[in-house]
Image (spheres, rainbow, N blue to C red):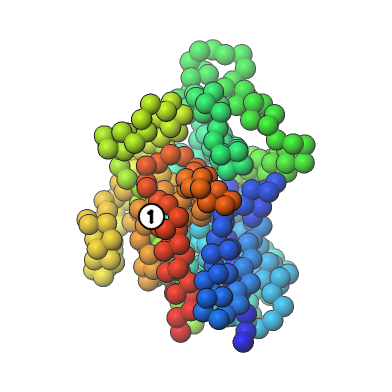
Amino acid sequence: MKRHHIILVPGFFGFSNLGGITYFHHVREVLEEAFEARGLEANVISVSTYPTGSIRRRASRIAETLQEQVDDDGPIHLIGHSTGGLDTRLMVTPNVSLPTEVDVQPWARRVRSVVTIATPHLGTPMASLFNSVFGQNLMWAITLGTIYTLRFGKLPLRALVELVGIVTHIDKRLGLKETVREQFYRELFSDFDPVRRAAINEFLHNIRTDRAVVGQLTPGAIDLFNASTGDRNTTRYGCVITRAASLSLGALSTLKVDPYAHASHAMFRVLQFITARNGHYFDLKRDEELALVRAYGDLPSARSNDGVVPTLSQVWGEIIHVARADHLDVCGHFRDPGHKPPHVDWFISGSGFRRPNFDALWGDVTSFLLQE
């Protein structure tokens, strides 16, 4: 029986493995177990991509990874989270031209399914912000803060407060000689060993020197992307939709008197507010609207989002699973300290996403991959 090759494509400022930190946390294991339970073998591969390079460059890494790591004629499935979903769509597009020496089309023709997870198919307002000088500082700080949190479980409270300072420009308002950003960088880096520090420094350098994808994720740029990117008629397309809860007294009450929880929750709400600044019109099909209403109890508005991507921007192809989750919950970055090894939250969003939700989501994805 042929092996199924499942290619995991990380999203915006994503990585495959960064100093022992994995982007898709426990996803490989849950997919392998799901396929084994069905008597099948899964070869799960994570793409080492360009963190903020152009979608064309990122898509070329998928083709290169296939050529490097797939050595038989088994079926291929592409799973892209966030921007990674756009990379998968572009790579499979008939007659696409990518900046690589790999002959893309033979690989593209073998792709049986494409699954996009929390992907901005119609763009995200967050990209417009990241195009500004302030947005570049914010993107850099959130990236480093995310890496630290996924490695150590939580940011130091002082660092989290400094991250809020970067967001609010407090360093400029106070006229500090050394910016909050520089303090934030120095304090967090001191906790990494030299090998991890070198890897992370290179990663951050790539983000500073190549941010081509940022401009490509704005709603206007994505309109052109969709006009030039076509679905392959031999490939099945499915999507996973995410939506985080809005600010409420109930969500705040779960934080109790933990100052870290309140600061982390506030940071997530800032991101959610930025992403909600959306005047775009989303034109859904009737069956898509009904699927969202069945899952959420109501139809998400244009302002609904997971902290990074508007919920209604994520629909492309068959709706496989609808989750109450923030942007990184679905990749395994949610709070579950009891699991071995533990799951660690990104920001405390109050989504309530836990391991049973994670298993259900990836179980539905597995079922979609194996449909004929």
Query: In the image, is 88 to the left or to the right of 122?
Result: right
Residue type (three-letter) at the residue carrying disc 1: Thr
Judging by the rendered image, the residue that carries numbered circle 1 is 242
Q: Give the x, y percent position of residue 131.
A: 51, 40
Asked where in the image residue 4 lies, by quadrant, the reply is bottom right
Asked where in the image residue 9 lies, by quadrant, the reply is bottom right
State the residue lying farthest toward the bottom. Answer: 1
| Within-10-Å neighbours for mark 1: few <14, some 14–19, many 20+ | many
Count of marks, rendered view: 1
Q: Is residue 244 above or below residue 139?
A: below
Q: Give the x, y percent position of residue 8.
A: 58, 63
State the residue lying farthest toward the right. Answer: 194
Q: Is residue 222 above or below residue 271?
A: below
Q: Is residue 231 visible?
A: no
Q: Is residue 65 above or below residue 145?
A: below
At x 54%, y 35%, the residue is 154
The answer to which of 45 and 202 lies nearer the viewer is: 45
* Kind of element beneath mark 1: strand
Q: Give the x, y percent position of residue 63.
A: 65, 69
Q: Is residue 334 visible?
A: yes
At x 62%, y 23%, the residue is 183
Q: Give the x, y percent position of residue 315.
A: 37, 62
Q: Is residue 55 above or below residue 342?
A: below
Q: Quadrant of the N terminus?
A: bottom right
At x 38%, y 55%, the residue is 242
Query: In the image, is 367 to the left or to the right of 100?
Result: left
